[in-house]
Amino acid sequence: MLARLALLLPVLAFVAGCSTWNNWFGGDKEEVLPDEPADKLYNEGVYLLNEKSDAKAAAKKFEEVDRQHPYSEWARKSLLMSAYSYYEAKNYEESITSAKRYISLHPGTPDAAYAMYLVGASYFDQIPDVNRDQGRTDKAIAALEEVIRKFPDTEYAQNARRKIEGARDQLAAKEVTIGRYYESKKNFIGAINRFKVVVTRYQTTRHVEEALMRLTECYMTLGIIPEAQTAAAVLGHNFPDSPWYKDAYQMVKGQGYEPQENNSSWISQAFRKMGLG
C-alpha cells in the first residue's frame, strides 16, 4: 500500500538541465548555481525512488524542492514524498519529522491521512523485542489511533487497526514475559499483577490464554482456590481447545477441585465487561 503512493502523485517528464553563469570579482571566477525548476527536482526524486531504488537520495531531491520552492504546489507534494522516501529507506525519524511537518502545514488536504499513517507506521516498524522498553509501541498505538479517529473511513484507518492489534499483542507479550519472571522468583503477587494487565487490557491478543493459565498456577500456589478455579473456568469457557486450558484443568483437578467460575471474581467481571464471558 505504501508503494502505491508514488503512483498517485503526478510524474512529469524531465525538463532541460539548468544553466550556470559566471561572475567576476577582482579577477576571481565564482560559479553561482541558480535554483532548479521544481518539477525537474521532483521528477528526479521519483526517478531515484522508482528506477534506482535509492530512497534516501530521492528524499534529498524532494527536500530540495521544498527548500528552493517553499510556497509552490510542488513543495507540498515533495514534502509528503520525502516522508515516504525516508520510510522506504528505513530512516524512520526523518520520515516522522517530514510527515509531521506536512500535517502541520497542510492539515486539511486529502493526503494528511496518509502523512498521519506514516507517522504511526514509522513507530510501528521500530517496535523492539519484548525484552526491551516498549515506548515505541505505545507511540505507534497513539499515532495509529489518531488516524482512526480523524480518518475513520479511509484505507489508512483499516491498516492502522491491523497494526494496532499487532502492537497490543506485543505489549501483552511484554507483560507475560515479566509475569513469568516474577513467578520464577516466587513473587506471585507481582506475577498476578502482570497477568491481570493482560486479562483486563489485552483480552483480544493471543497471550490472554497463557495469562489465564498462569493466574490459575499462581492462585493455586498461594492457596486462593476460588480464583484459581475461576481462572481455569474462564479459560475453558472461552478457549476450550487451548493447550493452556488443558494445563490449567489438570492443575486444578490434580488438587481435587474442578474449574468453577465465581461471578464476583475480577476475572469473571473482566470478561463479562468485554462481552467474552
Image: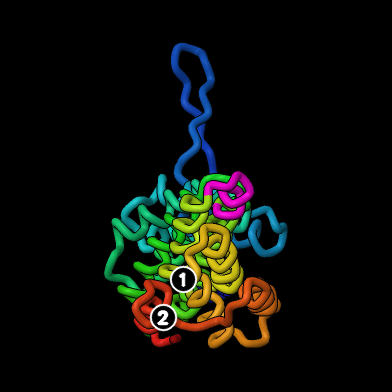
Tell me the SS state at disc 1. helix
Residue 276 at x, y percent in the picture: 45, 86
Count the marks: how many? 2
Can the viewer see residue 93? yes
Res 46 quadrant in image: bottom right
Q: Which residue type carries mark 1?
A: Glu
Q: Residue at x 29, y 56 (%)?
A: 104
Rendering coords of residue 225 (x, y %) = 50, 69
Find disc 1 in the rendering and name its residue.
Answer: 227
Q: How would you classify the magenta stretch by its main secondary structure?
A: helix
Q: Where's residue 107, x and y in %?
A: 29, 65
Residue 158 lies, in percent from the top left, at: 47, 80
Q: Nearer the viewer, residue 2 or 76?
A: 2
Whole-number angstrom distance, CA of label 1 to CA of label 2: 7 Å
Position of residue 21 relative to residue 236, above or below, is: above
* Disc on res. 190: none
Assess disc 1: are there few (<14), some (14-19) or many (≥20) residues with their C-alpha within 10 Å of its C-alpha: many
Looking at the figure, which quarter contains the N terminus? Answer: bottom right
Q: Nearer the viewer, residue 23 or 102?
A: 102
Q: Is residue 62 left or right of residue 183?
A: left
Q: Magenta residues, as a range?
A: 179-187
Q: Tags 1 and 2 in contact by the CB under 8 Å rule?
A: yes
Residue plotted at (37% across, 55% down): 100
Q: Is residue 276 magenta?
A: no
Question: In the rendered image, which residue does mark 2 sit on?
Answer: 262
Looking at marks 1 and 2 on the same chain, the residue that comes earlier in the sequence is marked by 1
